[in-house]
């Protein structure tokens, strides 16, 4: 065992220490004069023992060196992967939208808390010629692969910003993610998506298999926005059209869209939508709703990505005679 312990050290000189140790053990009876038999025979036996232990030490040392080299290579590769994943996370965070400027009458907030370094959820908003657009998507799976698909879907939907039809934007995103179902079910990667445009008092929206959007009215009522339309990325032949619907959105009404990671915070059922609506009733400011859900996710922990985006038509104060209404300040997005 001492021989193996010494020889397992990576430097080649470890073999010498192992052999010398073996020689000392073998020579001790010979030097002390307590060995029996012919001294020539004992010396020959010593020589054979040293050769055998030297060969064993060389084999153990070489195996140790090979293992150490493989371990260093694995660590280097792991460091490269970690660096790439960290960089991917930084790029993903850079794609999150900033505060909207010069948009009186609207308040928005959002956050995305990935379960891993890179998540498959995303949200977005931007100004249009006649209002505001908002998007939330949830890609099947986690990690870098899901993050790449999320970035591609976001970019495709954004490229349709001049098209006033949300359903058309989803069709374009679906075309970019179309997969050949003949390659087998493992090749299918789908994304649930909610995309809406608010123009005046009307919310034009399309839902691709998401179904986790609720409108909380100023009077406390709630309306869930969902459709039977399928997620995108399932193949053009399976589903190639998404219907655009409209919902009246009066001043003071709030739209909250979230990913299925939020459901897990309330037990995993669709009744979680009502829990989100209850949070909104207590404080209808988008930033407050987003912060409350983000704090809950951090407190409870989450195995799935948690993403929330909230849009509110700000209440219009009753004008005082002789006064001009000032623009409403826009809430900044919650940091992820």
Image (tube, grey):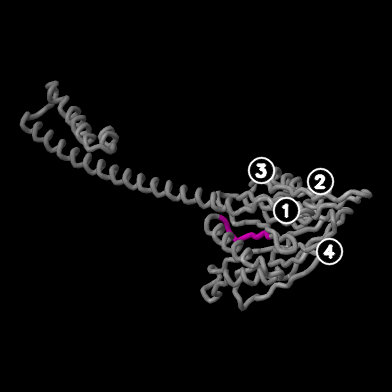
Image position, residue 15 (x, y; %): 21, 36
Q: Secondary structure at mark 2?
A: loop
Closest to the camera, between mark 4 and mark 3, is 4
| Distance from Cα at disc 3 to Cα at disc 2 | 20 Å
Residue at image x 67%, y 63%?
193
> Which of marks 2 and 3 precedes in the sequence?
2
Residue 90's place in the image compared with 208, above or below, is: above
Query: Are dots 4 and 2 in contact, CB under 8 Å?
Result: no
Mark 4 or 3, nearer chain start: 4
Q: Nearer the viewer, mark 4 or mark 2?
A: 4
Say which element carries label 4.
strand
User: Which numbered marker is on residue 248?
Assistant: 4
Q: Which residues are magenta?
A: 135-142
Q: CA distance from mark 4 to mark 1?
A: 23 Å
Q: How far apart are the two marked residues, 2 and 1, measured between alpha carbons?
A: 24 Å
Q: Pointers 2 and 1 in contact (CB under 8 A)?
A: no
Q: Which mark is residue 102?
A: 1
Disc 2: which residue: 283
Which is more toward the observer, 330 or 56? 330
Check the image and report above or below for 76 versus 125: above
Magenta span main SS: strand
Label 3, on which residue?
Answer: 298
The alpha-carbon separation of the residues under discs 4 and 3 comes to 34 Å
């Amino acid at each position: 065992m001492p021989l193996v312990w010494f020889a397992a050290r990576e430097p080649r000189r470890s073999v010498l220490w192992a052999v010398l140790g073996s020689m000392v053990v073998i020579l001790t009876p010979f030097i002390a004069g307590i060995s029996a038999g012919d001294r020539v025979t004992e010396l020959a036996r010593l020589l054979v023992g040293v050769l055998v232990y030297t060969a064993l030490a060389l084999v153990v040392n070489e195996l140790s060196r090979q293992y150490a080299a493989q371990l260093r290579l694995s660590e280097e590769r792991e460091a490269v992967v970690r660096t790439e994943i960290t960089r991917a996370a930084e790029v993903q965070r850079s794609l999150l939208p900033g505060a909207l400027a010069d948009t009186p009458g609207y308040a928005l907030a959002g956050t995305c808390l990935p379960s891993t370094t890179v998540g498959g959820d995303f949200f977005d908003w931007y100004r249009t010629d006649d209002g505001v657009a908002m998007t939330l998507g949830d890609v099947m799976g986690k990690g870098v692969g899901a993050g790449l698909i999320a970035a591609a879907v976001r970019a495709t939907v954004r490229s349709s910003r001049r098209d006033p039809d949300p359903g058309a934007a989803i069709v374009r995103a679906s075309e970019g993610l179309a997969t050949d179902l003949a390659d087998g079910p493992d090749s299918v990667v789908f994304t649930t998506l909610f995309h809406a445009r608010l123009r005046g008092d009307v919310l034009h929206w399309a839902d691709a298999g998401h179904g986790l959007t609720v409108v909380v009215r100023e009077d406390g009522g709630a309306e869930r926005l969902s459709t039977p339309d399928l997620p995108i990325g399932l193949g053009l032949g399976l589903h190639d059209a998404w219907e655009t619907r409209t919902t009246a959105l009066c001043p003071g009404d709030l739209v909250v869209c979230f990913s299925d990671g939020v459901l897990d915070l309330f037990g995993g059922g669709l009744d979680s939508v009502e829990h989100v609506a209850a949070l909104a009733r207590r404080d209808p400011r988008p930033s407050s709703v987003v912060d409350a859900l983000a704090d809950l996710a951090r407190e409870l922990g989450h195995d799935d990505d948690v993403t929330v985006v909230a849009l509110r038509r700000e209440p219009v104060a009753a004008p005082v005679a002789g006064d001009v209404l000032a623009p409403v300040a826009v809430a900044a997005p919650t940091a992820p």
